[in-house]
Amino acid sequence: MEEDVQLLFAYARRGDVQSLAALVRRHATWMQALLRGMLPVAADVDDVFQETWMRVIRAAPRYRGGMVKPYLATVARSAAIDHLRRTRAVVSLDDEEGEGAEAAATVVAEGPAPGEAFESQATSDDVRRAVNTLPEGPRQVLLMRVEGELSFREIAAELAIPLGTALTWMRSATLKLRRMLGGEK
């Protein structure tokens, strides 16, 4: 949106804190939803949300224009990935004993089809767990599309992948979620 570009430029060029605050308010809901989908620990969402905006603030003087929402999604995604790299312990699902066996047992969730999944908090938790089991690429495409409301062209550009790959990964994510959540047997 043109107004978003103007708000970011107002902050970057004049230090207009009100413009930055307006930008944060406009994008907080979808950005937090995107981060909730990427981060397995709910308590980390606020920290990574703040880190995202700190990165935007530090980079604002170098901002040269362009669509703001995909830019913010990329910054949020990078902050989440960096956070996960710092905090995530590696667990092999092939490990038949110990943590790997526990993790593998939680991969398949029971419940309704994805379209009905958001009707209750318990089901939302099942969906969140199922989304977190998706491979990195399809999960990012799904979250950027559903939570970030980005077009497939924007997603492809931000992830530096062909448009066809973004579409394929979305289909893959959707089919896997449907299977995991009981929509298809």
Image (tube, rainbow, N blue to C red):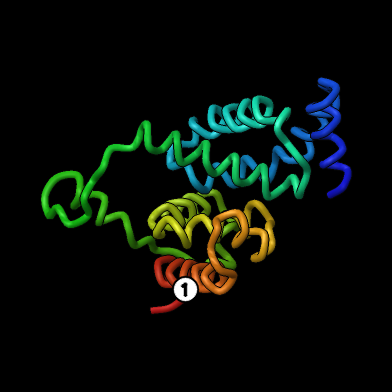
Dot 1 alpha-carbon crowd within 10 angstroms: few under 14, some 14 to 19, many 20 or more: some
Give residue 71's position: percent from left, percent from top.
Answer: 67, 45
In the displayed structure, 145 sits above or below 68; it is below
In the displayed structure, 175 sits above or below 43; it is below
Q: Nearer the viewer, residue 143 or 96?
A: 143
Q: Nearer the viewer, residue 30 or 129?
A: 30
Q: Name the quadrant of the C terminus.
A: bottom left
Horizontal relation, residue 11 to residue 156: left or right: right
- The residue under the point 83% across, 33% down is 9
| Disc 1 residue type (three-letter) | Leu
In the displayed structure, 111 sits above or below 164; it is above
- The residue under the point 25% across, 56% down is 105
Residue 150 visible in this rendered orientation of the protein:
yes
Q: Quadrant of residue 40?
A: top left
| In the image, farthest residue toward the bottom | 185
Give residue 169's position: percent from left, percent from top.
Answer: 49, 68
- The residue under the point 58% across, 65% down is 116
Label 1: which secondary element? helix
Give residue 44's position: percent from left, percent from top.
Answer: 49, 31
What residue is disc 1 on? 175
Horizontal relation, residue 141 to residue 14: left or right: left
Residue 113 visible in this rendered orientation of the protein:
no
